[in-house]
Image: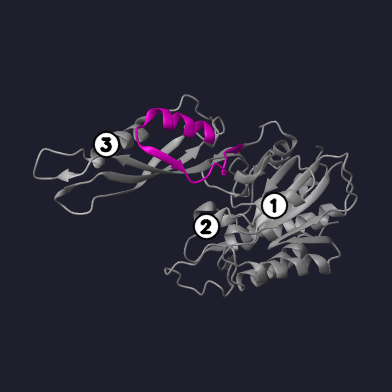
Amino acid sequence: MTDIAQLSSEGRDLLMQLIATPRVSRSEASAADIVEAFLERRGLDVRREANNVWAVASAYDASRPTLLLCAHIDTVRPTAAWTRQPHEPLIEGDRLYGIGSNDDGASLVSLIQTFRVINARPRNFNLILACTAEEEVSGADGLTRLIPQLPHIDVALVGEPTRMQPAVAERGLMVLDCTAHGRAGHAARNEGINAITEAIKDIGWFSSYRFEKESQMLGPVKMTTTIIQAGTQHNVIPDTCTFTVDVRSNEFYSNQDIYNIVRACVKSDVVPRSFRLSSSRIDIDHPLVSRALALGPLPDGSPRTPFGSPTLSDQALMPWPSLKMGPGDSARSHTADEYICLSELQQAIGQYITMLDGLSL
């Protein structure tokens, strides 16, 4: 019989070690060492790629489908608003305070413990664990660097704070740097072409355009102008105006698709920073989703309901279907005095194991 309480206690201790170890994106080496050592002490087949730690469960068979368990090691920097020491793990009642406790430490240690249990059980699928770096910045040395090292993956379970609600879709992200052009002139005379005026026309288009395909889970594609800069002095008509647009895609449009539509509709020069961060989805009838829903209501009695997530994760870099689901609450992520409830940690381990034990892919 699986001792969930013992697994939870070990997971808590590992999480407290990680909280005490600074692991801001691109500086996760010490935290990766801790995770690697934890897995090695338990006799697992552990591998390392930069600061990504991964393991392959026993009885790997290339003819079987493969499930990836994925959560990230890194954190954002603590804000100045913390009233506690972010790197001093502190338990108060049911709460464990510390940087990265909610995002993404609880999911990380829960999936590690789940991997250990399922590794020792018969199953009709391969199982791989990936503890990734640079997730908070979608960095090149995170999951992107790890993917070429992995065997074929059929589906992934991504641990992120969703209150253990199943996120079956996730918005993508594309940032557009735009430049509107005019012609310089003296502001006191009727001359020149004001680049700000030209930019306003395109900004108006970004705010009013509606893409035809809307997602049941994610809604419409969302485009928001977030930065604008122009002019050198009050009496000179500006000849350029730059502005930045934050684009959040749904699963019906690739970032390339959206870019092509934008270029056909605006006069400004448009330069995408990247096409890498795509929207993702998994079929609502996928066996992994079915197993999640079969867990029944949440501990507070509310229904377990598939939803679309507005926040970005490693899912954006995955070329395979993925389900995002983990302990904690996204509203606590990146906030001062971040915490996870120890009861949430214990419940997540038990629910993950129930989901995967007997799963048929």
Q: Nearer the viewer, residue 174 or 104?
A: 174
Label 1 element class: strand
Lateral position of residue 247 relative to residue 96, left or right: left
Mark 3–mark 2 Cα distance, whole angstroms, equals 38 Å
Q: Which mark is residue 198?
A: 3
Q: Residue furthest top?
A: 212
State whether residue 346 appears in this view: no
Mark 2 or mark 1, which has the lower sequence index? 1
Q: Which mark is residue 48?
A: none
Compared to residue 83, the image places residue 322 above or below, namely above
- Stretch of the chain drawn in magenta: 256-280
Q: How many marks?
A: 3
- Image x and y of residue 7, in percent: 76, 62
Lateral position of residue 15 relative to residue 197, left or right: right
- Image x and y of residue 131, in percent: 70, 58
Which residue is the site of mark 1? 70
Mark 2–mark 1 Cα distance, whole angstroms, equals 18 Å
Which residue is the site of mark 2? 333
Lateral position of residue 248 relative to residue 290, left or right: left
Whether 277 is among the magenta residues is yes
